[in-house]
Amino acid sequence: MTEPVGKEAHLIRVAFHEAGHAVASVQLHRPFKYVTNQPSGDSQGHMMGWRTGKWFRPDIEITSRVRTLIDAEVSVLLAGAIAERRFTGRSNHVGAKSDYDVALNLASYIGGSERQSKAYVKWRHTFAEDLIESRWNLVEAVARALAKQKRMTFDDVRNLVFPQPKFQR
């Protein structure tokens, strides 16, 4: 089998990035509307999440519910670049910049100083690396499916990650 080149290789790389986000989302119980490896606006691919409820006000109060969501969301944001790096063997700082910026912004609610926020992001990065490493076979399966289908819903990804047994009558 020949290695993909050009646009096809790019779409596969983006599929791995987005599959990292998607698998982390399923594992961390962060539903999303869909994930795609197709360009839109200035992004090469994206995952469309759901709006958080009115209860999510980290600028006012960090409850355990808010903290749990921030922990999961930061890990999901970082998981895309981690999966892409594992697949390609190199980091894509340009492609991951917006994910990292959003993660750092969320971290600012947890850590008071810039130094604390960066340490928090580093800790969540380590968590996300372990998650992607331990579920690499799932990331590969989702990336392959996404490369073919171009767009998958949360349920599509969840069914790949957690296949439901088929019952016979």
Image (spheres, rainbow, N blue to C red):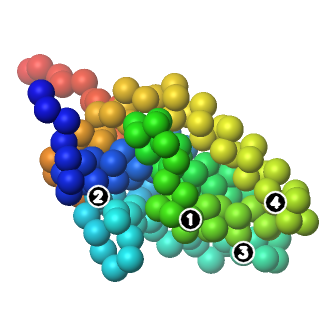
Q: Which circle marks residue 57 in the picture?
A: 3
Question: Closest to the observer: 67 or 88?
Answer: 88
Residue at figure coordinates x 79%, y 67% from the top left: 108
Residue on which disc 2 sits:
37
In the rendered structure, which disc, 1 or 4, sits on the residue that comes first in sequence? 1
Neighbours of disc 4 within 10 Å: few (<14), some (14-19), many (20+): many
Q: Residue furthest top?
A: 168
Image position, residue 90 (x, y; %): 49, 43
Residue on which disc 4 sits:
117
Camera-nearest label, 4 or 3: 4
The quarter of the picture where the N terminus appears is top left
Q: Amino acid at mark 3?
A: Arg
Residue 72 sits above or below residue 132 on the image:
below
State the separation of the CA atoms marked 2 and 4: 30 Å
Image position, residue 158 (x, y; %): 35, 41
State the separation of the CA atoms marked 4 and 3: 18 Å
Neighbours of disc 2 within 10 Å: few (<14), some (14-19), many (20+): many
Neighbours of disc 1 within 10 Å: few (<14), some (14-19), many (20+): few
What SS does tag 3 mark?
loop
State the separation of the CA atoms marked 1 and 2: 17 Å
